[in-house]
Image: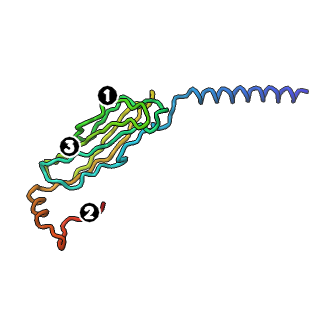
Amino acid sequence: MQPLKIRSIMNKNYFIFLFLLIVAIMLMPRLAQAQFVASPANTLNYGTIGVNTNKTLTVTITQDDGDDPNIDNITASISGGGPFTITNSCAGVNLVFTNDSCDIQVTYSPLVAGTNTDALTINYNYGASPTSSSVSLSGASIEQAILEQSLNSYTTDNPIFTSTS
């Protein structure tokens, strides 16, 4: 009889443990990444533009699943500054329903010739969980006179620039 009593106590403790584990998992805040879609997802590539000109590209943030917690407290920042600036940041926007979206616009305004890279960081709350996402920024610039000369000498027989899009 003694072993049966020990086995009965072990089974009871096992079920209590299992019950508490399930309750803890159900009450635990969601740790999964938000149903958040940024388009384009990884990179804004500005190509090559002339010095002292600018080009603006957009990252669209979309709530992918309205059943999940709201996406709010959206902030956008650029780590290095330089020739990249945020011209629309989605500040104060809450994404509640499926397909709710907002646009973050980033302008590239190079002052000197060269290649530039940086990162756009998007911070937001997903329910009660602070979360962030990053988009790489890249662009190149050449002196405007060189750009105009190159474009003027472009012919179909003698292409100077080619696109790999």
Q: Residue at x 28, y 37 (%)?
A: 77
Name the element at disc 1: loop
The residue lying at 45 percent from left, 36 percent from top is 34
**Which amino acid type corresponds to the residue marked 1 in the rendered image?**
Gly
Q: Is residue 155 above or below residue 19?
A: below
Point out the residue furthest to the bottom here: 157
Apparent side of residue 19 relative to residue 57 in the rendered image (left or right):
right
Indicate the secondary structure of the residue bearing disc 3: loop
| Secondary structure beneath label 2 | loop
Q: Are marks 2 and 3 in contact (CB under 8 Å)?
A: no
Kindly report the distance in space between the C-alpha atoms of the residues bearing marks 3 and 1.
25 Å
State the image coordinates of residue 135 (x, y, percent, origin top left): 33, 45
Task: Return the residue at label 2.
Answer: 163
Q: Which mark is residue 136?
A: none
Please identify the quarter of the rendering in which residue 98 is found.
Answer: top left
Image quadrant occupied by the N terminus:
top right
Q: How many marks?
A: 3
* First reached walking from the N terminus: tag 3 or tag 1: 3
Quadrant that contains the C terminus = bottom left
What residue is at 73 percent from the left and 29 percent from the top? 14
Task: Find disc 3 in the rendering and name its residue.
Answer: 82
Task: Classify 14 as above or below 144.
Answer: above
Query: In front of the other: label 2 or label 3?
Result: 2
Query: For this rendering, which residue is in front, 136 or 14?
Result: 136
